[in-house]
Structures are given as structure tokens and as C-alpha cells.
Image (tube, rainbow, N blue to C red):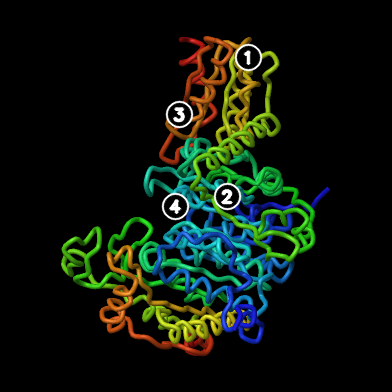
Amino acid sequence: MGELRLMKGNEVIAEAAIRCGCDGYFGYPITPQSEVMETLMVREPWDETGMVVLQAESEVASINMVYGAAGSGKKVMTSSSSPGISLMAEGISYIAGAELPCLIVNVQRGGPGLGTIQPSQADYFQTTKGGGHGDYKLIVLAPASVQEMNDFVELGFELAFKYRNPAMILTDGAIGQMMEKVELSDYKPRMTAEELDAKCGSWATNGKKADRDYNIITSLEMDSDKMEANNLRFQEKYRQMEEEEVRYEMIDCEDAEYILVAFGSSARICQKSVDIARAKGLKVGLLRPITLYPFPKKPIAELAKKVKGFLTVEMNAGQMVEDVKLAAGCGNSSVPVEYFGRMGGIIPTPGEVVEALEQKLIEA
Amino acid sequence: MDVKDIIKPENLVYEKPKLLTDNTMHYCPGCTHGVVHRLVAEVIEELDIQEKTIGVSPVGCSVFAYNYIDIDWQEAAHGRAPAVATGIARVNEDKVVFTYQGDGDLASIGTAEIMHACNRGENIVVIFINNAIYGMTGGQMAPTTLLGQVTATTPCGRDLDRNGYPLKITELISQLPGTAYVTRQSAHTPATARKCRKAIKKAFQNALDKKGTSFVEVVSTCNSGWRLSPVDANKWMEENMFPFFPMGDMKDGERDAPDAYLKKN
């Protein structure tokens, strides 16, 4: 059993980063995620593990610092919230294009624009469909508890290095700010120079040695044939992720007639909604996508063969519902897929969800 | 005298630096980039830091700088090279990191990144090629374009009311306490190229010695963008750019001591 603590989600991101052997964090303050960098600065990991923590002049700078440090093979990360992630979109596209591993944490708030500092899930499209320019995908992990905030830091880095692709933890102000019991991970040492060379020496800018050609980190390729080959390689990588990395949780789905589909905070609410619905005699289950990309299409397609309807519950205007419709309909199923959500920083109540389910699917 | 008598080691006065690759340069004939690339390669070779030097190339004509010097490189987004260099340098304290940027990259879109990297006193080298025009995109107005100078986006000459003033960014940089060495050079004659090489060497030595940020501006020509022959471009540069961008060191030492910047109680 690891060390048990009562911590905020944002604090846990920082603690998990130190413990998993992260080499560097570059960030810029923005509500509701400022505790990530504050916690790191209080912990002073540069003395403990040698991890670098730097407050940059902007989100634009912090993501480009991540690009630089990640290019040298180091395990580095940043965190921000929605408006800041928009500013990072350029850098994220470059990181994906240059095939660099890194971890980005988005503690979402409501938008558009400056929006609100209250929790939201309105960056689903931005995160899973691109965000920056060009054809690329992020590996997207959606924690639904403070414990998963801890677990997904290490998992995010692991997947990022496995695929040489940026990974994002897509969470929100509710999970970032709430305190829960968490079992912290054990300390892992940072990569040594030798380990880094063995793992990343074929591509990283860790200094040109006499026994190898120079390494270039770039997303640029002016030869269209070569650029298309790059694009095809990326797409192949994404297909591999779709084959191997889909993660999801199913609660009470075995006998369910109606399926709630929700991630992150919404999924926490929906667990209670399932209890309320079951108490009323409604056979309701919950499918919680853990990876938003790759999206759990297959379990949804399987469920679509036997259930009477899906209701996505989202803290946005209905974004993931499009992916659920695509997944449910891919077997020519005509099962209805409805959406219920709240916006503006409002978190739906479990009762509201059950009401929406009854109105949109059961009584309809 | 036979040619074999001439080609002897003792007669050798000039050769291609080992670190310059054999890739054909894409630069226009007459462009200053080729000269400065050579100087950077010579300095890295002379200091014997090939294995620990990481270059950061910009967006602009020198985006492909990574094709020409045989070291590890990262190509940055437009203007972000100082942030990229900061990231590399901070997690690799044993490395020497430099950016190579043009005026549009450094003094327009990347103003925030260069100011803050220099103000933090990052142990990096900045090579700043100022030719007062956007070369890569076809000769548009740059932040350093002189008033009256004709470009693709100032076809009647840069106009004060419409376009504002040319930016002396190097003078601004020299005021920042994090800088160790700030200088303006040119490389259009053998004598100035040798002087420029000395400045670049000092900058790299400062990075090795962890003295703070070293910033070397090279006032350069873009004869294609300026629509001039290489010879006329050099003349135009001397007559028009040198009076506004005077040569010489603006700061030489190390980053400021913290005393003057400390809170009082």
C-alpha cells in the first residue's frame, strides 16, 4: 500500500509528477489549476529529484519549453486550463508533428473566451478532434477521481513515450479543486543519461555523438511525398492506439436497458444517477470512457445491439454525443442516442440526469 | 609552379569547416546567412563542443539551418526559439544551446519569448540576423524595416503613420539584466566577418561559462528581398542600415548581480 493522503486533484498532479521521475514542468498560472505549479514550487523537487520547475512568461512559451525539453528526450510536462490550452494549440500541433512525448494537463473551465473559472467539459472537441492545425491526435485520459489524477500522470507519460506522441489529461475544475483520499505512487528515479540515450538516442537532441548522425527535431517537410508518408505514419500510429489503448469502465451494464455515457466529473454524477434509477426500477448502466482518444467505440457498438437507448451526460452543449452516435450507429443500429448537459460552470445533479433519461428516452 | 606545389598543408589559409555539411545551401547568392552559418560552425569546431551543442532554428529563411551544421537541432515554431532553447537548456545544464533567428521571428512575432529569455538570463546564445525584411515569405515589411524602405507590404516605402517605427530590439535587449553580452556586428567584408566570428565565439564561451544570455545581432543583407545585386545590397546596407543600427558592443560582462533588484525588507 502506497502513502495515503487527503489532497486536491491539482496538488496530486504535481506530487505524481515528482514521484514518477518527471524531468521538468513548465507552466503559467491560470485558474482553476494554479495549485499544480504552486505545489511544485513548495515541494522544491530540484533539490530532491533534480526535476526542473519553471514559471514561463505565457502558455505559448511554456508549451514551447516543453517542445524543447521533450525534444532532448526528457520527460516533461505542462498544465493549464481551457484559455491557456487554446494558446498552447500551436505548440501542441508542433509537438505532435515532431512526434515528441510529453504530458499536458487541461483542468477545464467554461468558455468560450474567458468564460468562467467554474468546471466544464467544453474542450472535448478541441482535445479529441485536434485543437491545433493539421491531422494529429492526442492520447486523451479523462480522470474521474483524485486517485486517477495520480495514476494518469505516470500512465500518460508511459503512453506518450510508447507512441512518441503528446498525451493529455483532460480533467476539470471540479476534480482539480476537490480533495479526496489518494494512494500516492512510489518514487521512481528520473532517467539517467545512459537510459535516455538507450531509449531516445535515435531521435533526441541529446548531443550529437561521433557514432551517429545528427538528430533533427522538426515537423517540417517540404517534399510532399515525404510529408504524406509522415502523415500516413502518424495515422498508422493512431490506428495502433485505437487497437491497443482503449480504456473504459462499465458499471451495471450487464442487464441495462439504458446506458449513460459520461466521462470525468459527469461520470461521478452519473454513478449516483444509476443508483437513483435502479432504485426506481429502471435498468440503467454507465459506460465511462477513460480514454477519450482512442474512444471506446467497440463497447458502445456492442451495447447498441441490445439496449434501448444511450444518454450522454456532459458539461458542455453536447460534444461527445456525436462520437457515441457514430459508434452506436456503426452496426446500422437505430438505437436512440440523446444528450443531456449543463454549461456555464454548472454541474448537473444526479436527479436531473435521471429526469432527462426518463423524458428523452423512456417516455419518448 | 605545379598545382601540387600549391596544395600543401603549409599553404592552406582557408578551408571548409568540418562541421558544415555537404548539403547544398538554399540561400540566395549574396545572402549573409551562409557567412554566419560558417562562422557558427567554425566557433563550435574551435571550442570542440559539437557533442554538447544544440541549435534551435527559427521560421524564416534559416528554418533549414539544421541541414547545414553537423550538430543536433530543433526547429521551432515562429518566434518561439528562445522558449524552445530555454526548455532544452534548463533540463540539460551540460549542453550549449543557441538560437538562430531572423528579424521577423525575433523582433516581431517572438518579442515576448526573446525578452523573457534574456531577462531570465538563460544560459543560451542568440544569433540574430537583421536584414530588415521578411525573406522567406517574399520580402514583406519587418519590424526593423527603415522608414521609407520599399517592401512587398510597403510598396510606397514604410510610412510612420501607417506602420510605426523600426524597432531597435538589440538596444532593448541590452537593458535587460539577464544578458551577459549584447553586440551588433556585420559580416559583409573579411574584416567584419572576422570580428563577427570573435563576437560569436565570445557568446558561446559565455554559455559554457554560465554567464547569462549572449546576444549577437548581425546586420545583414537580403539582396533578393531588397531587389539589389549582392554588391549593391552591401552598399545599401552600409549607407542606410549602419547609421540606424550602429556597430559595436552594448553590454559585455555577465548578467547583473542581484543586489539592485532585491526587495528591501
Q: Chain of mark 4?
A: A
Give the residue drawn at x 36%, y 75%: B169
Dot 3 amino acid type = Gly
Which mark is on residue A318?
3
User: Quick one: label 3 or label 2, which is nearer the N terminus?
Assistant: 2
Task: Estimate how packed mark 2 is, as few (under 14), some (14 to 19) or many (20 or more) residues with alpha carbons within 10 Å.
Answer: many
Give the residue drawn at x 69%, y 66%: A45
Residues beneath discs 3 and 2 located on the same chain: yes
- Of tags 2 and 4, the one toward the viewer is 2
Residue corresponding to mark 2: A98
Tell me the quarter of the picture where residue A16 sits: bottom right
Residue corresponding to mark 1: A283
Distance, label 3 to label 1, CA atoms, is 24 Å
User: Quick one: label 1 or label 2, which is nearer the N terminus?
Assistant: 2
Residue B177 visible in this rendered orientation of the protein:
no
Give the residue drawn at x 63%, y 18%: A278
Task: Estimate how packed mark 3 is, as few (under 14), some (14 to 19) or many (20 or more) residues with alpha carbons within 10 Å.
Answer: many
Distance, label 3 to label 4, CA atoms, is 23 Å
Residue corresponding to mark 4: A87
User: Quick one: label 3 or label 1, which is nearer the N terminus?
Assistant: 1
Dot 4 amino acid type = Leu
Q: Position of residue A119 (x, y in %)?
A: 49, 43
